[in-house]
Image (tube, rainbow, N blue to C red):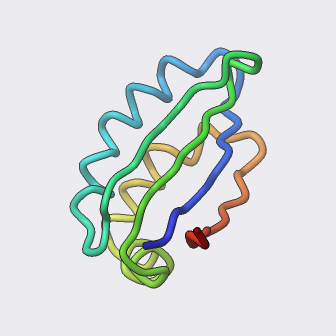
Amino acid sequence: MITEHALLSVTPGQEHDFELAFSEARPIIASMAGFRGLSLSRSIESPNTYLLLVEWERLEDHTVGFRQSEQYANWRALLHHFYDPFPVVEHYQNVL
C-alpha cells in the first residue's frame, strides 16, 4: 500500500467553497482502480491549510491510473483553482 501525502494551501477565505468542492470531487477519486481510502484534515493553527492523505494499492494507481485519466480532468477543474501555492505531492510506503 502507498500513502499519497499533500499539504493543500487554500486561498484564504475560500475554505468553505473548497470543502464543498472536495465533497463533490471525492467520488471521482474513490471510483479509481487501486483507491483504498482518503482523509482530509484541516489545520487548527493555519485554517486555510489541509492535509490530504490518500491510500492506493500501488504507486501507479495514482501516478498513471488516476492522473492520466479523464476523471482527473474533472478533479482538477473542481479543486486546483483553490491552491496557492500549488501543493507538493509525495508518496510514502510503510516500513514498520
Question: Residue drawn at (40%, 33%), measured in percent from left and top?
Answer: 21
Residue at the far front: name it.
Answer: 96
- Residue drawn at point x = 68 percent, y = 24 percent: 48
Q: Vertical placement of 91 versus 22: above or below?
A: below
Instruction: Using the rendered view, name the quadrant where residue 96 is placed.
Output: bottom right
Left or right relative to 73: residue 91: right
User: How many numbered marks are there?
Assistant: 0
**Residue 39: x and y, percent?**
43, 41
Q: Nearer the viewer, residue 41 or 88?
A: 41
Left or right: 93, with 21 as reference point: right
Q: Residue at point 67% right, 16% down?
A: 44
State which quarter of the image contains the N terminus. Answer: bottom left
Foreground of the two, 96 or 75: 96
In the rendering, at what x and y percent does residue 29 appear? 33, 57
Left or right of 57 in this view: 89: right
Picture quadrant where residue 42 is located: top right
| Residue 49 x, y percent position in the rendering | 68, 30
Left/right placement of residue 63 relative to residue 82 reads left
Percent position of residue 60, x then y = 45, 84
Query: Observer-nearest residue: 67 or 38?
Result: 38
Against 75, residue 58 (above or below) is below
**Looking at the rendering, which quadrant does residue 72 occupy?**
bottom left
